[in-house]
Image (spheres, rainbow, N blue to C red):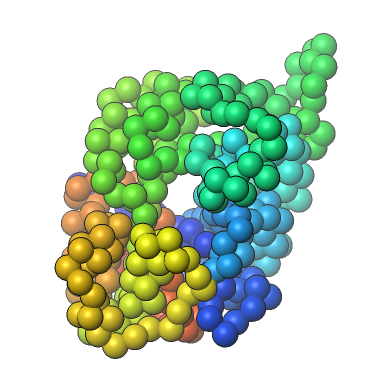
Amino acid sequence: MKPLSEIRLSMLDLVAVREGGTVADALAIALRTAQHAERLGFVRYWLAEHHNMSGIASSATAVLVGHIAGGTQRMRVGSGGVMLPNHAPLVVAEAFGTLAELYPGRIDLGLGRAPGTDALTMRALRRDRVETEADFPRDVDELQRLLAPAQPGQKLVAMPGAGTQVPIWLLGSSLFSAQLAAERGLPYAFASHFAPRLLLPALELYRSRFRPSATLDNPRVVVGVPLIAAPTDDEAQYLASSTYQRVLGILTGRRGQLPPPVPGFMDRLPDDARRGIADFLACAVVGGPDTVRTGLAQLAQATGADEFMLVCDVFDPALRLRSLDFAADAMGMAVVH
């Protein structure tokens, strides 16, 4: 097992719109969070594509990547991810190629194959396109070609995009993307922040079938971790009730904006609701400094992750930054303000 100090720390931001807040507030909070994460030494900051959700403001993912990259200096910024079936590969290559020219060496392109929305919105995004299982691997191939140096006689060239070789990551919550990432020799990020059930089988499959490529010599794994930290376990659980409410809304089809914390929220729920939230957040680390350090160490031992990507939905933006401080301290990173 790697010591925690050798595991890199990153962040995935859904750009939550808080109850009583606005989209503009959410975007400003995202930038401040990214700047704080960069000061702590986080290596990357990703934004996730979602659509038609009142509580999430990250639908125009490439635009947000540019906004965050423009407000930071060193940290890598990217998508976690772009839902590739919603877009033509050429459009994605041009958008991320442009970002790569604006912010050289700092842009990541994480790709997912889920819709990131409901069926009605999916149809609005894709029009009459009907996706097959073969489409995603083919679209990944096309993106790799479009971001590679243009070849003599190549008729379709992404401009900008060609030659930028923006790093492509495959994202997934099942075995499909794990196998594809292994076959292509690409880095792999597992969405254990919301779908932890297949985490260990997917990582085993990815590592066992990995084929070295021009991109990567050895497997590289990022694991999503819901994290909320505070000075005490009790306070962390209180702050986490915002996340518990959000997850319950997802499980019951009543999505909304990120709510403020509620004392004793979990205690008032029926057993089946508590079990559903616990399953959804099986990889979550919630607690005071000792609990956080122990939880991250256990996750490191179980997964052998190269990198943890934190998801931190705390209603109070200042306490969200404090959670990141605790996480960085647990990982052995120097906390500098």
Query: Which residue is rendered at x = 51% and y = 62% of the image?
Result: 13
Q: Quadrant of residue 85?
A: top right
Along the line of sight, the residue nearer the viewer: 235 or 209: 235
Viewer can see residue 206: yes
Query: Which residue is rendered at x = 68% and y = 55% of the image?
Result: 60
Q: Residue furthest top?
A: 153
Is residue 27 shown above or below 280? below
Image spot of residue 238 (x, y percent): 30, 83
Query: Which residue is rendered at x = 50% and y = 70% of the image?
Result: 256
Query: Which residue is rendered at x = 26% and y = 60% of the image?
Result: 276
Q: Quadrant of residue 173?
A: top left
Image spot of residue 96 (x, y percent): 69, 43
Viewer can see residue 4: no
User: What is the count of numbered marks?
Assistant: 0
Along the line of sight, the residue nearer the viewer: 126 or 221: 126
122 left or right, relative to 182: right
122 left or right, relative to 176: right
Image spot of residue 161 (x, y percent): 74, 35
Along the line of sight, the residue nearer the viewer: 323 or 332: 323
Is residue 118 shown above or below 329? above
Image spot of residue 92 (x, y percent): 69, 39
Is residue 79 shown above or below 71? above
